[in-house]
Every structure is written in C-alpha cells, then in structure tokens.
Image (tube, rainbow, N blue to C red):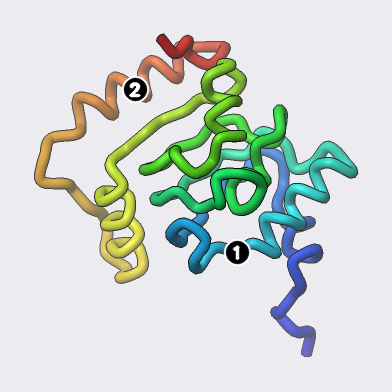
C-alpha cells in the first residue's frame, strides 16, 4: 500500500495553476513553513504553480521573508482573501501595485468559517449582514479584467 504521507516538495508539486490554497496559523505559529518554502521554490524554478487564490485568516508571516511572504512573487498569486495583511508586506506590495485581487474580511469571521467547515456544518452567517458587501465585491470582481485600483 502506497503511503499518503509526502514531504513538502512532493506536496508542492500537487498544487496546480489556479488552485485555491488555505493557510491557517497565527504570526509564525502553526503555519506550514516547509510547504510554503517548497511552493516558493517550485514557482521560482518552474513558473508553476501560478495564479493561485489564497485564503488566510491571520497575519501568518514574520513581516520579512517567511510565512505567506514566500508567496509574494508576481504571477504566483492572483487573488487573496485575508483577515490581516500586516505581516506579509510582499503580498501587500502586489496588492498596492494592482497585480492581484485583494480582499480584507474580518479575521474573526474567517476563523469562524474555518471552525464551521471543520465541524462539517453546511455554512456560517456572521451576526452582521455582510451579504451586501460580499455581493458588491463579487460583482465588481466578475466584471473586471484587471485587479481593482486601490485608492
């Protein structure tokens, strides 16, 4: 029987262009540093995977090179939804230069969504009505051929 356990490099090769990746952790605790490092190396060597969508709750980096900063290369990311952007300046730079679609949702809402999904529940609705905001954002994103300008 073939093992389902793979190392970081083998796992990075399983991530394909335009996949969505979800990363959880807080600052530098509980983040898959070896996998993020392998993903970065794979992209820098081959140009793939590219145009990934990233979903992350907290600032999962050291504010310099590690964590989600490893994904801050033009072409590697296409869309990012995060609850905290303060610790990943390389990804922020891509957003400010309009090279990625960038969305900021409340960190607590993203964490609650993780909890709901892990419990096998069908969905989650925050106490505040976020539908108008999300619908406007999704419609704007669908109608755009390029990332929105950040003012």
**Residue at 47% across / 56% down in the picture?**
27
Q: Is residue 43 above or below residue 36?
A: above
- Would residue 151 be found to the left or right of residue 45 on screen? left
* Circle number at residue 101: none
* Picture quadrant where residue 145 is located: top right
- Would residue 46 be found to the left or right of residue 31 on screen? right
Quarter holding the N terminus is bottom right
Pick out the residue farthest to the right: 45
Badge 1: residue crowd in 10 Å (few <14, some 14–19, many ≥20): some
Badge 2: residue crowd in 10 Å (few <14, some 14–19, many ≥20): few
Q: Disc 2 marks which residue? A: 137
Distance (Cα) linking label 1 and label 2? 29 Å
**Nearer to me, 100 or 91:** 91
Q: Position of residue 117 (x, y in %)?
A: 34, 62
Q: Position of residue 125 (x, y in %)?
A: 18, 48
- Would residue 91 be found to the left or right of residue 35 on screen? left
Q: Position of residue 107 (x, y in %)?
A: 31, 47
Q: Is residue 125 above or below residue 94?
A: below
| SS type, badge 2 | helix
Nearest-to-viewer mark from 1 and 2: 1
* Picture quadrant where residue 7 is located: bottom right
**Nearer to me, 132 or 82:** 82
**Residue at 36% across / 18% down in the picture?**
139
Report the number of discs. 2
Q: Disc 1 marks which residue? A: 32
**Residue at 71% across / 29% down in the picture?**
75
**Nearer to me, 90 or 73:** 90
| SS type, badge 1 | loop
């Amino acid at each position: 029987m073939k093992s389902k356990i793979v190392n970081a490099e083998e796992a990075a090769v399983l991530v394909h262009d335009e996949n969505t990746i979800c990363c959880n952790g807080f600052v530098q605790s509980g983040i898959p540093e070896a996998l993020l490092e392998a993903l970065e190396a794979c992209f820098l060597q081959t140009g793939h995977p590219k145009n990934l969508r990233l979903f992350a709750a907290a600032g999962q980096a050291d504010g310099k090179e590690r964590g989600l900063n490893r994904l801050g290369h033009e072409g590697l990311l296409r869309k990012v939804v995060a609850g905290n952007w303060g610790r990943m300046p390389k990804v922020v730079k891509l957003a400010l230069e309009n090279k990625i679609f960038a969305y900021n949702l409340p960190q607590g809402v993203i964490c609650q969504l993780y909890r709901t999904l892990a419990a096998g529940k069908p969905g989650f609705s925050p106490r505040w009505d976020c539908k108008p905001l999300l619908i406007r954002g999704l419609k704007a994103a669908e109608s755009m051929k390029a990332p929105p300008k950040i003012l």
